[in-house]
Image (cartoon, helix red, strand yellow):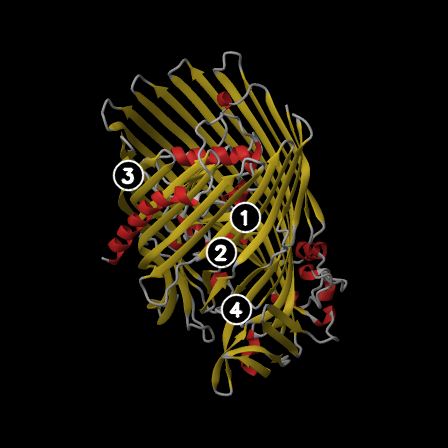
Amino acid sequence: MRKHNRIFMAVQVALLAGQALPALAQDEKQDEVEVVEVKGFRGSVQKSLNIKRLSSTIVDAISAEDIGKFPDQTVADAMSRITGVQVEKTDGESDKVSIRGTAPHLNLTLLNGQNVASATASTSILTPSRGFNYSLLPAEVVETLEVHKSAQAKVDEGSIGGTVIVKTRKPLSTDRNYLVLSARDAYQESSGEHSPLLSGFYSWKNQASDFGVNLGAVHKGNGIRRDRVTTAGFVPAELGGDTLYAPSQARASRYESDKDLNTLTATFEYAAGDNFKLIFNNLYSSVDVSNEQVANGAYVVGSVNEIINPQLNGDTIVSGQVPANEADANWAREVLYSAGSHDGSYDTRVHDLQLEYRGDNFTWTTQLGHTEAEGEIQDDQVEFQASALVGFEVGDGQIHYDLPDDLTPGGYTGLYTHRNLISNTQQETYLQTDLNWLLDSDWLSSVDLGLKYRDHNKTSALFKVVWHPDDVGAMTLADFTDGALVDDFMGEGHSQSDLYQFRYASWDEWTATTEPLREYDHLQYGFDLTEKVTNAYVQGNFAFDKLSGNIGVRYARTEQRSEGVDFYMKYTWAPETWTWVPVIVERDYTDVLPSLNLNYQLKEDVILRFAAAKVMSRPDYDLLTSRRGYRLSAWSNPKNPGFQGNPNLDPYRATQYDISAEYYFTDSSILSLAFFYKDISTYIDEQYFPVMLPDDEGNVDEYNLKTPVNSNGGVNQGVEVNLQHDFDNGFGLLANYTYADAEMDEEGKELPNNSENTYNATVYYEKDALSVRLSYNYRGSYYAGVVGDMRWYQQGYGQLDANLSYHLNENVTLLLQGVNLSDAKQEANVGDDSRPYFINHYGRRLFAGVQMTF
């Protein structure tokens, strides 16, 4: 009853808004409209609004200003200006997108209507996600980007947040012999590094305009530096008979990354007469990554029950000292220095063939294609420890440590090393056929019918190299550093105490000349998941007087095969003593997904929309693995830990409703209000379960296995307000705000990745040869996951960006862009400000260059 009352009230609000929005806008409509071609950013805004206005579903769009000139550096950056879209940043660059409070892996991204395989070259391979990696898709190849917030039967299932459809340019719709060249320099203030950004686009078609080709090439260098201080979470401390919480550590780190992206695109289009058309899209993207990181600081957790002079904020120890204990048998002593390097690459390929035939009253389309991605990385890690009296202080936006002045690199001895050779692949082959049949009816204008088959596979593997503890223990940090410290830490112009620079060349020499203790396939991290999906849909499209829309149903059958291992790991790191048993789990499930979209033309410039649908999203890959591992442990919390995947997880499923009112008071202006309501029937959580299991000798004991399970769902509802206006004097404004309120059915649970408040605003001026934009984006705090036994939260983050371009003439444009001009830091905590988790600083980035058009 509560749900239906909310929906009824929302309908009333939208109807009232449809009447009220025109009155809220102060501009009067012109009786006569002069048709003028608008280019640049103003033209992009106008095209985007036109897509939204004419859509049969609830859609927001972004269009390229011109060929090869998308409004932002990345596709995800551009999406951050869309109402209800929340962006996540990795390495200082937007690469993941949440829509209406749903996690990135619960949204779907399609390139020209189809999935793009993605892989990574980072340690995130160990927890692979369905979330799309936007960093592999250069903005230069995009013509339009649409965010579909309501579902329709003819669009692929797999999202409970929204579906992003990226479209590239077609040759026969592009001017003949059109060439665009762009060259820019990217400068990161914190690292002082310059990186090149080069792109080119060429379009050709014959004199008959029935055959054409588009060729595109992009090279992007991305050199970044990130400084971080972290506690790595908080752990229980037993002091004076009380249970308190102390930081696990207080450490500083510097991370430097160099990434080179090379993307080639080729699109061929052939029109055989007026009826038949063939389009062949191809994309090849290759990324090479080299990352290095050093970290040092106080390692508190090893002696957390021995803290001296503890200072409290409630039950949190915010400062104190950890005594030296050279006889400590814990994993690490009181000071822990680490260095790591990650070198790898990932490649992505897309081949998509589309055939279209237009009859007198029907259009038949068939798409077949293949996409695949491969990623690999060499992950090297080395750690050194020292025993000393150390101090720490955390809270109020700081994480600080104190190490003894007389501790030198020679006082650090080798503790641990590893080399992980990690690989992952993803591929999909698909065949789809669609029929749109025009009907001679007063209200049912056409019917869409379609079938689709997808064969999807995801794999991951890890090969491990470990050196002998005696060889590692014989090392000191002095073998790999001359004592120089990293400088200008956190952009504050000083060196970070005891954060020594590391000679990676010396490390490579050590690994090359030192015999490993063992090398083996670590099956704990390997899996092979196959999904074969069969789809069918029917959708009716109707228009009657002022009412239009569509109604349909989509059928999805998923056949899943998960391959992994059961293994028992003794309390030793020697894999020859472990027991491995292959496991294969097969299952299938079916979803029937109805959808309805209604659009009502209340006035010539006012549109009311209503949508309802059942939607689903498949679980992340690592949750579906059929692997299980467990071992005896006398010191871990929980006792005898272990983990297992759950191939029998059900998908996320939801019923959603959308209502909106849109008032278009000029061709480039809109005032809109939208209400969304998502009733998520099940969410996926992780819980510890006690299970009686045998060891390799048949002895049975109780193990606590961390297991993903289908838990209760919840409701995510909210309101979106959007205002865009071109003042017709060169100035314009884009502003929006989203409020998302999530309530989980199970008490104490929270919806991950949901920011209650999100807003952004762009002010622009564009006249004659000059175009200037100033944008501010803000995303409120959100629950991001669990560290140890405690929840952690990404804090609210906002940044200021600026764009400037100047047309020297018809062919040459100068470009200048500043990203994060406000020099904002990313911060996270474990519940409140007295328990900081980490603080990241990336600094400002500047882009300057030229674009030439011929």
Work out whether 214 lies above or below 207: below
Q: Are marks 1 and 2 in contact (CB under 8 Å)?
A: no
Work out whether 731 lies above or below 331: above
Instruction: Depth check: give the residue in front, 239 or 518.
Output: 239
Q: Are marks 4 and 3 in contact (CB under 8 Å)?
A: no
Q: Mark 3 or mark 1, which has the lower sequence index?
A: 1
Q: Mark 4 or mark 3, which has the lower sequence index?
A: 4
The structure residue drawn at horizontal position 45% and vertical position 69%, both measured from the top left corner, is 789
Residue 452: x and y, percent? 33, 34
Q: Are marks 3 and 1 in contact (CB under 8 Å)?
A: no
Q: Are marks 2 and 3 in contact (CB under 8 Å)?
A: no
Q: Mark 2 or mark 4, which has the lower sequence index?
A: 4
Image quadrant holding the C terminus, namely top right
The residue to which callout 3 is attached is 554
Measured Cα–Cα span from mark 1 to mark 2: 32 Å
Q: Mark 1 or mark 4, which has the lower sequence index?
A: 1
Residue 629: x and y, percent? 41, 62
**Under tag 4, what secondary structure?**
loop
Q: Mark 2 or mark 3, which has the lower sequence index?
A: 2
Measured Cα–Cα span from mark 3 to mark 1: 32 Å
Measured Cα–Cα span from mark 2 to mark 4: 27 Å
The residue to which callout 4 is attached is 233
Mark 2: which amino acid?
A: His
Left or right of 828, for residue 298: right
**Mark 2 or 4, closer to the camera:** 4
The residue to which callout 1 is attached is 94
Residue 230: x and y, percent? 58, 66
Mark 1: which amino acid?
A: Ser
**Mark 1 or 4, closer to the camera:** 1
Mark 3: which amino acid?
A: Arg
Please give the count of numbered marks on the rendered protein. Answer: 4
Say which mark, if any, is on residue 522.
2
